Amino acid sequence: MNRHLISAGDLSRDDAILILDTAEELASVEGRAIRKLPTLRGMTVVNLFYEDSTRTRTSFEAAAKRLSADVINFSAKGSSVAKGESLKDTVQTLSAYDPAAIVIRSPHPLSGVRSSVSAYQSPCPLRRTKSPL
């Protein structure tokens, strides 16, 4: 499977089946009294949002917490991004937390972000959430 997932179009058929099979296994956790798994215990997931979102941010936050991750939710609004901080500087700052993954939501196309962000941050998978049209 690709290390970074920017678009569903990046997935091979086998990768898509693996994701669906894993989702089916994880769905079985819903019936448990304790719905947390230790998969990401001791790891951090960063949700990096450049646009307002409720459902998407809380969905990613809940998923990471159910896998026992520590979660950092970053909103561009009210941050140094509003003063002109670049994506590069923001990612480098958040990379100091050694995240297991960075989820990025942006209203702008992120073509090229995979390679450029990977070049200036600690190696971790990037996940792009789909912005509504």
Image (cartoon, rainbow, N blue to C red):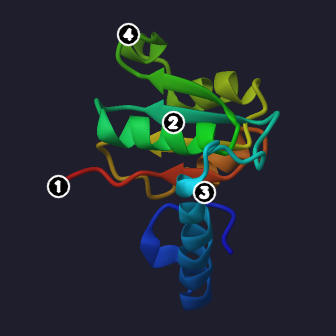
Instruction: Report the Cα–Cα distance between label 3 and label 4.
Output: 36 Å
* Of the image marks 3 and 4, the number of the one nearer the N terminus: 3
Along the line of sight, the residue nearer the viewer: 57 or 22: 22
* Of the image marks 4 and 1, the number of the one nearer the N terminus: 4
Find residue 133 and name its label. 1
Estimate the x, y position of residue 47 in percent, counting from the top left: 52, 34
Estimate the x, y position of residue 111 in percent, counting from the top left: 44, 58
Instruction: Report the Cα–Cα distance between label 3 and label 2.
Output: 17 Å
* Of the image marks 3 and 2, the number of the one nearer the N terminus: 3
Three-letter residue code for mark 2 = Glu
Estimate the x, y position of residue 82 in percent, counting from the top left: 37, 14
Task: Work out which residue is located at the far bottom of the displayed protein and give it.
Answer: 13
Instruction: Report the Cα–Cα distance between label 1 and label 2.
Output: 22 Å
Write down the residue under mark 3.
29
Q: Secondary structure at mark 2?
A: helix
* Of the image marks 1 and 2, the number of the one nearer the N terminus: 2
Instruction: Report the Cα–Cα distance between label 1 and label 3.
Output: 32 Å
In the picture provided, is 133 more to the left or to the right than 116? left
Q: Secondary structure at mark 1?
A: loop
* Of the image marks 1 and 3, the number of the one nearer the N terminus: 3
Q: Secondary structure at mark 4?
A: loop
Q: Secondary structure at mark 3?
A: helix
In the picture provided, is 104 more to the left or to the right than 45? left
Write down the residue under mark 2.
61
Find residue 78 and name its label. 4
Q: Of the residues tagged 3 and 2, which is closer to the observer?
A: 3
Estimate the x, y position of residue 24 in percent, counting from the top left: 55, 72
Query: Is residue 87 among the parts visible in the rendering?
Result: yes
Q: Are marks 1 and 2 in contact (CB under 8 Å)?
A: no
- The image quadrant of residue 115 is bottom right
